[in-house]
Image (spheres, rainbow, N blue to C red):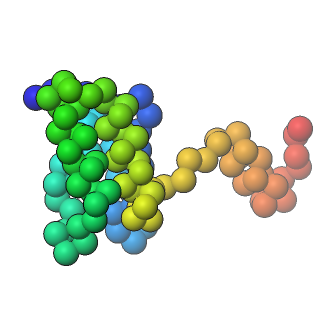
Amino acid sequence: MTELAFEDTVYVIVGLGSVKSISTVMEAYVFLNEWPMGMDKPERTIALKTCKAALSGMVDAEVARSTFEAFARRNHLLVPRVNPVLAAKAHRGSTGAPDQS
């Protein structure tokens, strides 16, 4: 089995204030495999099977990333993507620094 890198890293919340980056199919597979059984949901099963299929070469890594991201979103684990330029402008505006635009 290979790791198969994602084009875009998926960031998930793993604890209060803790974020984990998932950048390969193998990392997603391990994360899903370690998910508590009492919290098992159909989207986890689908994502797990898709990751396993990607590791076997049956589907593309981006299909696995997409299903993993859907799992994370449905379980409120997905860290939203932030545009760094907009975040910098918002931060600059909140600090009272003059806007350079």
Image position, residue 51 (x, y; %): 23, 40
Q: Nearer the viewer, residue 95 or 56?
A: 56
Residue 12 visible here: no
Q: Quadrant of residue 74?
A: bottom left
Task: Tell me which residue sits at (28%, 65%) in the image.
Answer: 41
Residue furthest toward the left?
1
Q: Nearer the viewer, residue 41 or 18?
A: 41
Residue 2 visible here: yes
Image position, residue 99 (x, y; %): 88, 46
Q: Quadrant of residue 67?
A: top left
Image check: 29 left or right of 81? left
Is 75 rendered above or below residue 64? below
Task: Tell me which residue sits at (41%, 28%) in the image.
Answer: 7
Residue furthest toward the bottom?
38
Is 13 rendered above or below residue 38? above
Is 22 rendered above or below residue 91? above
Q: Quadrant of the N terminus?
A: top left
Q: Nearer the viewer, residue 62 or 77?
A: 62
Image check: 62 left or right of 84? left
Image check: 42 left or right of 57? right
Task: Tell me which residue sits at (72%, 54%) in the image.
Answer: 91
Q: Quadrant of the C terminus?
A: top right
Image position, residue 47 (x, y; %): 28, 48
Task: Tell me which residue sits at (26%, 37%) in the image.
Answer: 25
Image position, residue 49 (x, y; %): 20, 45
